[in-house]
Image: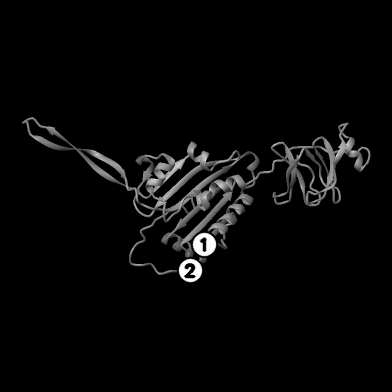
Amino acid sequence: MNLPISNGLISVESNGKWGYIDKNGKYAINPQFDVSLCFIGKVALIRSAKKVGLIDKNGKYIVNPQFDDGKDNSYFSFFGEGYSFDLVQSNFFDSNELIGKLFSNNHFIGLETNKNNVKDIVKLFHLKPDNFSYKKTTIRENEKLNEMFGTPNIDIRELQIEFRSDAHYYDEKYEYRTDYWGQRQRYYTGTEKVFIDTTKVSAMSIKLRLRDKALLKEESLSTSIKNKFKEIYNLEEIKVQEEKAIALKSKDKKQLVIIHYGDNNIQISFMTGKASVEITNNLLGIYVAPQAEEYEDEYDLYGDDY
């Protein structure tokens, strides 16, 4: 149960301090009081340092905390005998922690598609060659993943990273042995995956699972993520037919973001290069005649199931 909304504000608790949020879940008055009650008219009753006072909708004191709180309900006498409130903790979820982690260093998941490469990804996530499949790597339910991008209310289900070309190759292995006649012969022993360290990142997709205080907030959280992409990459929104989806593109179409949300899950895909142009044209309903040469970049991030 939450306190009633009054004048568009609701009293919430965070880390032992009380403040107020608006109907969009944004802090209107930061948590700073020992107790904060709902607004009645233009004022609200608060308690700070064991003293009771009144604030306005901007959080400024109308009456400084100066009255004793000798009895449990003595300060309710401001509004008449018998007036009472139920103080409860809110299920308000602050998305700032997740946004900060997803866009560390002002880049989506901290990576630059024209700079970071296979070597960086291997080092960052402690990966082995078996984690790679030609042009991509998929990391699932990984402790490192949740440490880097997760929050107390959001788990990271999967991170998929794709590259502009093959991320590895197969190196044939041989060994020399002495045969029956005493001659040294070279024998094939198998293949080994070897990283191509310099191959650049071209696309990223991350899947989030919401729980606890984040439950049922996938739409508002997706909107916050959309706004951060627009801020950092200067992207513009594309209208899409799918109800629970958001698409953003750069002016040259070489950057594309697609966000799917629903059932307490969010998938964010960020792609660049020729594949971005192709998918953007499809979303815009623009037909482009196929070229003679094939694209070197191939992606399967768009439209993955949750």
**Residue 155: image x %, image y %?**
55, 40
Instruction: Name the residue: 80% across, 45% down.
Output: 4
Q: Position of residue 194 (x, y in %)?
A: 30, 43
Q: Quadrant of residue 210?
A: top right
Find residue 191 and report its image quarter: top left
Label 2, secondary structure: give it: loop
The residue positioned 81% from the left and 44% from the top of the image is 38
Could one spot residue 42 in this view of the protein? yes
Q: Residue shown at 45%/60% (left/top)?
A: 276
Tag on residue 249?
1
Give the colouring mode of the picture. one colour
Q: Amino acid at mark 1?
A: Lys
- Label at residue 286: 2
Q: Are marks 2 and 1 in contact (CB under 8 Å)?
A: no
Residue at mark 2 to residue at mark 1: CA–CA distance = 14 Å
* Residue 87 image offset from top left, x and y in percent: 79, 37
Q: Earlier in the sequence, mark 2 or mark 1?
A: 1
Q: Is residue 171 left or right of residue 205?
A: left
